[in-house]
Amino acid sequence: MPNFILNKQYLPTTKVSIVIPARNEEKNIKHLLKDILSQYYPTHLMEIIVVDDHSTDQTAQIIQSFQGVKYINLSDHLHGEILNAYKKKAIETAIAQSEGELIITTDADCRMGAYWLLSLVQYFEKYKHQFIAAPVQFSNNGSFFQTFQSLDFITMQGITGAVVNNQSGTMCNGANLAYTKKAFHAVGGFKDIDDIASGDDMLLMYKIEQKYPARIGYLKCPEAIVTTAPMQDLKSFLQQRIRWASKATKFKDKRIQFVLGLVYFFNLTFLMLQLFSLQNSQNLFTFFGLLILKTAIEMYFLKPVCHFFKKEKELYPFFILQFIHIPYILLSGLMGQFGSYRWKERIVK
């Protein structure tokens, strides 16, 4: 997939509403809002809406200190109702009060360059897609743990670009999305998926792709990259991946579930070969042979993706990381279907 070439002199005409759900983000929200307010985009065509999801820190005060930012207190719209999917409700509430034709979502802990918004809108106005997935990356301090997370996330981004390019609406990330308000309302918003805590991105994308075939796109443009922080410890990392894995069985298209299941059982094969090697050492040779083949194929796929994100050096420990990647896939996949997880200080089933 070739890069989309941004014309920095382009004059957009689309009114956009940038929707940001936030919960206890006092350390991050100020930086995000400064980035958005510094965009090279006409201010009369840009609306910023931040929905405070029951924050108990200084998030609300920081949001309200910014001029030109619309603040919504989610609790004012719930009337004491207890939900399983607060983020979806936050986005839905913001869209109901939005004025833009194009809805753009990002997360409160994200950072972006000054041409982020222009690249999204220029791509939208050229191709008229109803849903646009755009690139997201993890920041990386160089530690082994963060390198693993960054590379794992880049892998997902590469798969996202590939499947969207083939008009399969199955992968994206809510930190960098754009979709028309028309499409959101046409599919009933989050109806039928509003009881699922996660899935404000992938499950919505799937609904829109079903309604508007061949009207989704992936914006492969360096200026469109959004950066977010990785998890700071193993526990929060596993909680995040379990949350992501919990969406796997929510797709109505059984072909998607089949492919995800195939990937899971392929990784399970490595565990089984290790166990069988205790009885027959020949299985250990099979294990390493398959592992080398798996690594070679994935590195071939990942090399151009890492080049796009300027993260080629992260490939150096790739083979060693396989010994972490396989167990984590098995654990998060299992817990995602049968366990619960903690997200934003809430326990979610």
Image: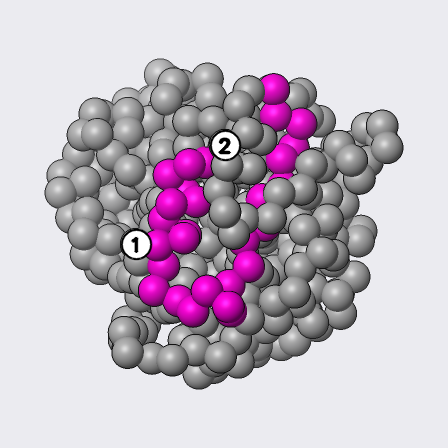
* In this picture, residue 146 sits left or right of residue 232: left
Q: Which residue is mark 1?
A: 113
Question: Residue 103 sits in which quadrant?
Answer: bottom right
Of labels 1 and 2, earlier in sequence is 2
Q: Nearer the viewer, residue 208 or 170?
A: 208
Q: Is residue 340 above or below residue 151?
A: above
Question: Residue 144 sits in which quadrant?
Answer: top left
Q: Judge the density around disc 2: few (<14), some (14-19), many (≥20) Cα neighbours within 10 Å.
A: some
* In this picture, residue 4 sits left or right of residue 320: right
Tell me the quarter of the image containing the C terminus: top right
Colour approach in the figure: one colour
Q: Judge the density around disc 1: few (<14), some (14-19), many (≥20) Cα neighbours within 10 Å.
A: some
Residue furthest out toward the bottom = 126
Query: Which residue does the image show at 61% across and 71% down from the upper left?
Result: 101
**Residue type marked 2:** Ile
**Residue type marked 1:** Gly
Disc 2 secondary structure class: helix
Q: Is residue 198 above or below residue 217?
A: above
Tell me the quarter of the image containing the N terminus: bottom left
Query: Which residue does the image show at 75% across and 65% down from the upper left?
Result: 185
Return the x and y of residue 20 as percentages of the image width and height: 55, 46
Query: Which residue does the image show at 69% across and 36% down from the upper left?
Result: 73
- Residue range of the region highlighted in magenta in the rendering: 29-56
* In this picture, residue 339 sits left or right of residue 190: left
Instruction: Residue 48: tell me if it is visible.
Output: yes
Q: Which residue is mark 2?
A: 62
Return the x and y of residue 306 as percentages of the image width and height: 22, 52
Q: Nearer the viewer, residue 338 or 144?
A: 144
Q: Nearer the viewer, mark 1 or mark 2?
A: 2
Query: Which residue does the image show at 52% across and 75% down from the upper left?
Result: 14
